[in-house]
Every structure is written in structure tokens, then in C-alpha cells.
Amino acid sequence: MTAISLGSLLYEGKAKRVYATDQADLVAVEYKDDATAFNALKKAQLAGKGELNCQISARLFELLERDGIPTHYLGMPQANWMHVRPVRIVPVEVVIRNTAFGSLCKQMPIEPGTPLDPPLLDLYYKDDAFGDPLLTDARLERLGLLSADQRQQLERLALAVNTSLRRFFAAIQLQLVDFKIELGFTGSGDLVVADEISPDTCRLWDLQVADAQDRILDKDRFRQDLGGVVEAYGEVLKRVQGACPNPRLGK
Ligand code: UDP
């Protein structure tokens, strides 16, 4: 870390630890090597994964900021550490799908690989104890998590993230199949993109590879026991590095 001193552990999730620091407007996020899937029923340690996800995520946050999309990101002081603004995470996972795959094809009669235009936006209630269920409008309203205005803002931001990421990934020969983001409110009440954006949270297919398994460069390699998870994430970082601004160091 730089001049910032770490304080107490505020939160430990499946892939990251969040620490307070000696600065009230900054928290430090440590990306871990733990890999989990299927609501943590499947677990492994993948050496190097935390660093790769942090490196990829930092550059994608740089890209979003450059495109005028507000995020919690402040910089990357070390390979697997990120500085971010403290936010109150909205317990809603926003999934945008450009191509049908994964849970969508298990729940609806849509062939995997079907293009979705316009993209499909799904909201899930972020709570492992309930298995992150799909939200309906009525359930979201019942939970009272967001006002109508805030929901509109959240969806607008998520769609802007999709436009930005999709264009960026296409230019480095990666198909952005779908992704999940989380958003949070800053102390001053602004809604910003938070959490991480990495091959753990995005489905990315190599446009230069035709084989349906070999082209997978994301967490599905872990979910489906395809092997080469860290190598795939490394390939994503290599391409992202070549096309994205270098991450700022943080405070
Ligand atoms: N996703 C995620 N965290 C979750 C659930 C989904 O990052 O808790 C991502 C997932 O990697 C994929 C997208 O959201 O890029 C859509 O996932 P889907 O709903 O298809 O669920 P899955 O098939 O992964 O169970």
C-alpha cells in the first residue's frame, strides 16, 4: 500500500476483503484467490486469480470513468489492491445479457447463443441465504430498496455500462455475452457502479476461436471444470492491457 494505513476489516465476501483506512473517504479492497460457484457449493483456490481480476477490473473502471460513467473506483495501489470510495451497496444484482446463456436458458425456452437485441436486463435480490432470486417489479417495490427514480437511474447506468464495455470488448475480439454489476450510493447520495468487473462477473467469448468450449475466457471454465481458468483470465488481461489506460495508483 502507499501512504494509506489499513484499518479494520469491514466486510469479507467470497472474492474480496474490504478494509477501512485512515481516510474517511477511502476504503481498500483486497482481491482474493478464492474461486466459488453455485452459491459457494463449489470452492477452490486459484493462485493469481485475485491479482488478475483486480488488474482487469481497475482498467475497466478506468474505461467507464473515461466514458462518463460514475464508479466507486479511485485507483490501484498494488497488483491485488484497489482503492474505492465507500458506498452503501444496493442489494440488487443487475444482469445484462447480450447473448442468451447460463441461467436464462435453463429458465426459458431460449437456445444458448441466441442474440438478444435489445439486451435483456434482469434484477436479482442479492442475498445468498435466499439464493439470489430473480426479482419482479412487485417484489422490488415490496422490498422498498429503491425509489422509482433510483431504479430508473440504476437501469440507465447499467445499460450505459453495457454499451461501453461491449464496444470495448468487441475491439479486442471478445464477445460480451452477459455480465453482473452491483451499484451503490456514495455518502452524498450519488449512485455509482461498484464491486468488480472481471471474468468472474462477465461471460467473455474469444471471437477468434470457433470451438464452443475453447472460446470461453471466464468463470464458466471453473463452473464447468474446463481447466485453464487462470490462463483464460490472463488472456483477457493481456488484451485489456493493450487497449485500456493504465490504472492510476490510488492515493
Ligand atoms: N453472475 C455473477 N454473480 C452471480 C450471478 C451471476 O457475477 O451471483 C454473472 C455471471 O458470471 C454471468 C451473468 O452474471 O456473467 C449472468 O449469470 P446467470 O444469471 O446466467 O447465472 P449462472 O448461469 O452464472 O448461474
Image (spheres, helix red, strand yellow):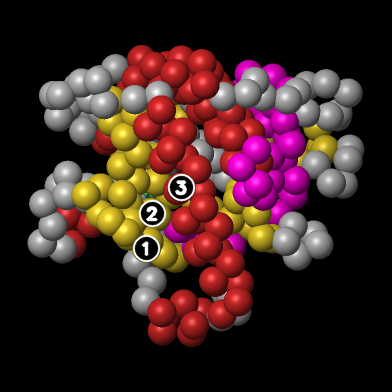
Q: How many marks?
A: 3
Left or right position of 160 against 73? left
- Tell me the residue that label 3 is attached to: 163
Residue 49: percent from the left, percent from the top? 47, 23
Q: Amino acid at mark 1?
A: Asp
Q: Earlier in the sequence, mark 3 or mark 2?
A: 2
Labelled disc at residue 96? 2
Of helix, strand and loop, which one carries label 2? strand
Residue 218: percent from the left, percent from the top? 34, 31
Residue in the picture at 38% in, 54% down: 96
Q: Amino acid at mark 3?
A: Thr
Whether residue 202 can be seen here: yes
Residue in the picture at 74% in, 49% down: 86
Residue 146 falls inside the magenta stretch: no
Of helix, strand and loop, which one carries label 1? strand
Q: Nearer the viewer, mark 3 or mark 2?
A: 3
